[in-house]
Image (cartoon, helix red, strand yellow):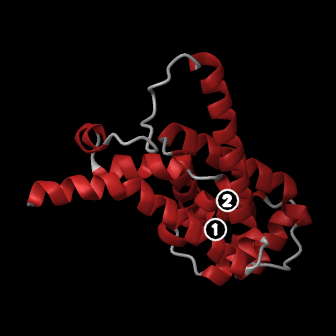
């Protein structure tokens, strides 16, 4: 049975067809959620929420775009809504902990290089990016999607995707400069 037929059956309420959709896409949804929130438990919660949303909304899917694009958009929305909610709750409960996150904007290259490994630093910088830039960066480099695919999924122009990607890359480059300079000094 092809995907289109499975989706049609799920739209008619066939639970076996819906379960097939979940089995097909569960790992991709979980991976995407994990790329955004960086927490296994939160990613699993997001995955559940995504498939609840898909279950409720699958009758409205009209085959105008690919099913994966539709599902991916639901995943992004759910993950970012969850992340926003967690940040809000974290702020309310920990608003006095000013040093919880590394301030990349300050010139603290010593702390920057000694306190974290490169992957942690990179993830921290990415978390601080504006949401649209973060989405595009994750889709391009973690999901390996083409510019055209990102534009289609997000419903924006390819030029806009390129603009967000360029700005995200520029911010990463600037934030990593102290790290790069410290390592160059160590080599000389």
Q: Residue at x 78, y 56 (%)?
A: 54
Point 25% across, 40% down: residue: 110
Coordinates of residue 146 in the picture (x, y in percent)? 58, 81
**Sequence-wise, which precedes: disc 2 or disc 1?**
2
Which residue is painted at 72% across and 72% down in the image? 153
Query: Disc 1 on helix, strand or loop?
Result: helix
- Relative to residue 70, is residue 171 depicted above or below? above
Q: Residues within 10 Å of mark 2 (few under 14, many from 20)?
A: few
* Quarter of the image that includes the C terminus: bottom left
State the CA–CA distance, disc 2 to disc 1: 7 Å
Quadrant of the rendered structure where residue 139 is? bottom right
* The quadrant where residue 48 appears: top right
Provide residue 30's location: percent of width, then percent of height: 55, 54
> Tag 2, which secondary structure?
helix
In the image, residue 2 lies at what x, y percent? 70, 82
Whether label 2 touches label 1, CB < 8 Å = yes
What residue would you read off at disc 1?
164
Q: Nearer the viewer, residue 69 or 163?
A: 163
In the displayed structure, 84 sits above or below 127; it is above
Query: Is 128 left or right of 156, judged from the image as shown?
Result: left
In the picture, the quarter occupied by the N terminus is bottom right
Residue under circle 2? Answer: 132
Residue located at (69% from left, 71% from top): 68
Q: Which mark is residue 105?
A: none
Q: Decide if residue 139 is in sight here.
A: no
Q: Indicate the position of residue 11 as horizontal and vertical percent values.
A: 86, 65
Taking depth in this image into account, of 23 and 167 the one nearest to the observer is: 167
Q: Residues within 10 Å of mark 1 (few under 14, many from 20)?
A: many
**Residue 163 in sight here:** yes
Task: Reply above or below: 128 against 97.
Answer: below
């Amino acid at each position: 049975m092809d995907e289109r037929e499975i989706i049609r059956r799920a739209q008619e309420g066939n639970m076996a067809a819906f379960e097939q959709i979940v089995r097909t896409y569960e790992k991709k949804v979980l991976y995407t959620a994990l790329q955004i929130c960086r927490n296994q438990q939160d990613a699993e919660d997001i995955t559940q929420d995504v498939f609840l949303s898909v279950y409720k909304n699958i009758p409205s899917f009209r085959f105008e775009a690919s099913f994966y694009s539709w599902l991916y958009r639901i995943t992004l929305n759910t993950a970012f809504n969850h992340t926003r909610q967690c940040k809000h709750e974290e702020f309310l409960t920990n608003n006095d902990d000013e040093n919880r996150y590394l301030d990349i904007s300050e010139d603290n290259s010593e702390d920057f290089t000694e306190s974290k490994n490169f992957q942690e630093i990179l993830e921290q910088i990415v978390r601080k990016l504006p949401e649209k830039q973060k989405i595009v960066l994750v889709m391009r480099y973690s999901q390996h999607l083409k510019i055209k695919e990102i534009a289609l999924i997000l419903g924006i122009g390819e030029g806009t995707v390129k603009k967000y990607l360029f700005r995200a890359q520029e911010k990463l480059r600037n934030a990593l400069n102290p790290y790069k300079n410290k390592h160059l000094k160590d080599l000389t």
